[in-house]
Amino acid sequence: MEPIVEFSGVSITLTEALLAIVLMLVAIFVTALVMRTGQSTEARELQRHLSEMRGEQSRLQGRLSQFAEDSERRDANFAEVLDTRLAGVTDRVGKSLELAQTRTGENLSKLNERLGLIDQAQSNIKALAGEVSGLQSILSNKQARGAFGEKQMQDLIRAFLPARAFSFQHTLSNNTRVDALIHMPDGHGDVAVDSKFPLESWRRMVEADGSYEADGAKRDFRADVLRHVRDISKKYLIEGETYELALLFLPSDAIFAEIHTTFDEIIDKGFSQRVVIVSPTTFMATLHTMQAVMNDAEIQKNAALIKREVSVMAEDVTRLGERVGRLQKHFRQADQDISDIQISARKINVRAKKISKVEFEAETLEEDSPTLKLVSKDDR
């Protein structure tokens, strides 16, 4: 129950106040009754009850005082505990805020690094977009496309073959100019390489894919490629001057795969016309094979020289074996001499030890003729 009066740290509730008022009224009533009736038996009984009630009142006041003290102690303890807990909570909150601030700083630092990487990646993407745009502009022009394929073909040839093994824009005996002519060893003939693939027809076919013009674009592409294959066979295959096969270079492996997948008749017609279609990957393998053929021909050409050099080298090896034998003989003699020296050294060492055990002892046999006697330490 809530106290209604607090005085000097003592709280009085409504029940306690009513009880005190009742006791006071009973005391007044009993006093008045005693005054009226005198020293009668009832008055004395009431007086006794009044004394007991006063005693109960005193005990009640003592209990109230004790309760007030206990309340003060509980309030003090509660305040102390509350302060301690608040201090702990404040400390934990401060540490949490400090940790959160540290983590936030680290996250911001990492975010700045990632933003830097993103900026760098964006710059790279812009540069790549510019290169792609440049490549697209190159491929959109017919002459530029032809130059691009020819440049790619020339770079591959330079990477695999020596400079004396090829020539670019070579004019043949029939006054036709081939993009590249690979000079094979004697008896094989030179291989003609053409890089002017009809990419315009391919581009139109790709753009018309899925439309009503797709079939017509495919027919046009097939016809253009077959016409170009016939032109290569007619212009670049010259008996006695060029090799029996010519190469048609495609600047894209994707186009090469699509032709093999969809246009089988182009491949078959090319073989029948002795024209082989190659992509950058297959062209590298072809150049590697040509390089091996050239190396083998070079080895065959220099076989006599190699045989003579091997014979001379065999003679040198024989002489080297003889010299090693003589050197080994010298080593054996030196080893025998060293062994003899070691034997002499051991003998000298033994004699030195014997001499170190001998003492000279003077004996006076006669006054005028003293003699020296060698006495061994073992004899004493």
Image (cartoon, rainbow, N blue to C red):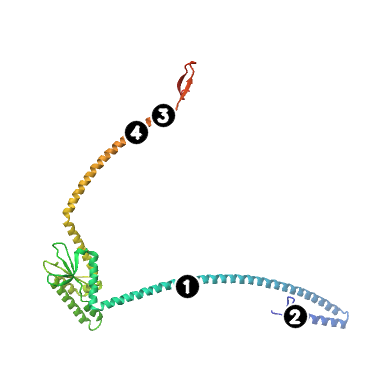
Q: CA distance from mark 1 to mark 2?
A: 67 Å
Whether residue 257 is visible, yes or no, is no
| Residue in the picture at 22% in, 77% down | 143
Q: CA distance from mark 2 to mark 3?
A: 132 Å
Foreground disc of the pair 1, 3: 3
Question: What's under tag 4, amino acid-wise?
Answer: Ile
Q: Residue furthest right?
A: 38
* Residue designated by label 1: 108
| Residue in the picture at 18% in, 53% down | 306
Q: CA distance from mark 4 to mark 1?
A: 85 Å
| Front-most of residues 60 and 139 | 139
Q: Residues within 10 Å of mark 4 (few under 14, many from 20)?
A: few
* Mark with earlier residue (2, 4): 2
Residue 26 spot, x, y in % from top left: 80, 81
At numbered mark 3, what does the secondary structure look like: helix, strand or loop?
helix
Question: What's under tag 2, amino acid-wise?
Answer: Ala
Residue 45 spot, x, y in % from top left: 84, 77
Q: CA distance from mark 1 to mark 3?
A: 90 Å
Foreground disc of the pair 4, 1: 4
The answer to whether marks 2 and 4 mark residues whose Cβ atoms lie closer than 8 Å is: no
Q: Residues within 10 Å of mark 3 (few under 14, many from 20)?
A: few
* Residue designated by label 3: 352
Question: What's under tag 1, amino acid-wise?
Answer: Leu
> Which disc number belongs to residue 341?
4
Residue 10 spot, x, y in % from top left: 74, 76
Residue 243 picture quarter: bottom left
Whether residue 152 is visible, yes or no, is yes
* Residue designated by label 2: 17
